[in-house]
């Protein structure tokens, strides 16, 4: 449907008629240079031949004025209302990309993959489901940095996650710095519900901030932290003496991750394989539901340039005809 934003402009529609009726007409004081006995007959003939064209010109002028007023009233096309769920939740993902994430103790479609590849697969699907949340991404290794600020653009956040590379932030693991950065970013936000999901496969071996100290700050700021420990418990490794069973997650500091979750009102999860991580994210969907108040938005398209273009075109034609008539 079409609506006019500034409908009061239609009050000036009769302005040209008022000017025509109320203002005195300009009179010519110049006399004729030559008196012709049959001048009146010639004048009547000219008026008869130009009467129809004059009426058409007046009609075009009226249409041009109406189009100009319509453009000034700012017409808009208002589309059908679209329902958009807005949860108001700020959700940050902190993903470990340290050197240990290259351990190939995970499987996707029965093919061995490293831990980060598995996280990209499952976390990417989780991001796509979080319609209405403002999602951001923190990547950390020896250093922690904000890869994607909080945004409703889930597609871009997911793409930045898929482009993450192991070791680009250093080989060690700065869990405390990642938590500190998340707390700093989330506490600056005005929203009430703030959530951090931290995925790591190791212990805090770098950085300047103690993880538990960062968790206490998160608790004061009412920030919930869900921690996920990633890595298999058992793995067969080929060696010179044959196959042997090893624990690739021996460095995982589960006690600290559990304590961080408890302090902030979150939960700790253990992901030993892809199915475990999928179940964890499904549970997170229930713990932090997406459903919320729907905000109805109506798409708006500006249309003023159509009547404005028509008015300018008619004005150009009128000037062209008048110019030819004066020759």
Image (spheres, rainbow, N blue to C red):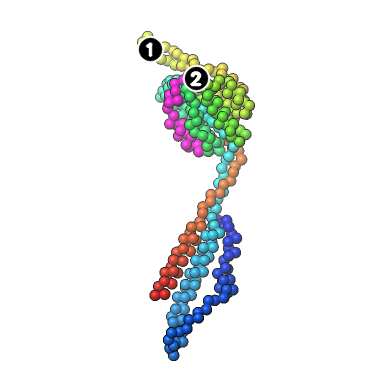
- Mark 2 or 1, which is nearer the eye? 2
- Of the residues under marks 2 and 1, which one precedes in the sequence? 2
The CA distance from mark 2 to mark 1 is 31 Å
On screen, residue 185 above or below 248: below
Instruction: Judge left or right: residue 277 versus residue 325.
Output: right
Name the mark on residue 239. Answer: 1
Residue 251 percent coordinates (x, y)? 49, 16
Residue positioned 55% across, 53% down in the render: 78
Image x and y of residue 82, in percent: 55, 46
Extreme residue toward the top, this view: 241
Q: Residues within 10 Å of mark 1 (few under 14, many from 20)?
A: few
Q: Secondary structure at mark 2?
A: loop
Q: Is residue 189 above or below residue 29?
A: above
The single residue placed furthest to the bottom in the displayed view is 37
Q: At x 38% / y 12%, what residue is drawn?
A: 239
**Magenta stretch holds residue 155:** yes
Q: Which residue is mark 2?
A: 206
Q: Does residue 236 show up?
A: yes
In the rendered structure, which segment of residues is drawn in magenta? Answer: 153-174
Can you name the residue that lies furthest to the left here?
240
Q: Quadrant of residue 185?
A: top right
Quadrant placement of the N terminus: bottom right
Query: Nearest the camera: 260 or 57?
Result: 57
The answer to whether 192 appears left or right of 164 in the picture is right
Residue at the location (46% across, 63% down)? 312
Image: 83 above or below 193: below
Residue shown at 59% from the left, 59% from the top = 7
Position of residue 99 measured from the top left corner of the image (x, y, whole percent): 44, 21
Q: Nearer the viewer, residue 223 or 209?
A: 209
């Amino acid at each position: 449907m079409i609506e006019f934003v500034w409908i009061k402009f239609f009050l000036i529609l009769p302005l040209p008629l008022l000017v025509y009726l109320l203002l005195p007409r300009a009179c010519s004081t110049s006399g004729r240079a030559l008196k012709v006995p049959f001048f009146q007959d010639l004048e009547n003939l000219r008026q008869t031949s130009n009467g129809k064209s004059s009426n058409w010109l007046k009609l075009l002028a009226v249409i041009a004025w109406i189009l100009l007023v319509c453009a000034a009233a700012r017409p808009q096309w208002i589309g059908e209302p679209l329902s958009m769920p807005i949860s108001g939740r700020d959700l940050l993902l902190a993903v470990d990309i340290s050197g240990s994430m290259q351990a190939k103790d995970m499987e996707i479609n029965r093919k061995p993959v490293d831990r980060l590849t598995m996280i990209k697969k499952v976390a990417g699907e989780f991001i796509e489901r979080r319609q209405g949340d403002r999602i951001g991404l923190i990547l950390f290794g020896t250093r922690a940095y904000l890869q994607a600020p909080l945004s409703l653009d889930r597609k871009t956040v997911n793409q930045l996650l898929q482009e993450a590379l192991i070791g680009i932030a250093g080989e060690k693991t700065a869990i405390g710095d990642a938590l500190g950065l998340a707390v700093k970013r989330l506490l600056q936000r005005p929203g009430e519900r703030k959530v951090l999901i931290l995925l790591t496969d190791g212990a805090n071996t770098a950085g300047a901030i103690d993880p538990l100290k960062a968790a206490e700050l998160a608790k004061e700021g009412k920030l919930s932290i869900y921690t996920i420990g990633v890595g298999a418990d058992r793995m067969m490794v080929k060696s010179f003496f044959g196959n042997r069973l090893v624990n690739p997650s021996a460095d995982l500091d589960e006690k600290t991750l559990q304590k961080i979750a408890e302090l902030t009102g979150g939960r700790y999860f253990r992901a030993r394989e892809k199915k475990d991580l999928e179940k964890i994210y499904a549970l997170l969907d229930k713990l932090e539901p997406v459903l919320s108040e729907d905000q109805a938005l109506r798409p708006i398209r500006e249309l003023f340039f159509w009547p404005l273009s028509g008015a300018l075109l008619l004005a150009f034609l009128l000037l062209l005809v008048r110019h030819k008539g004066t020759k």
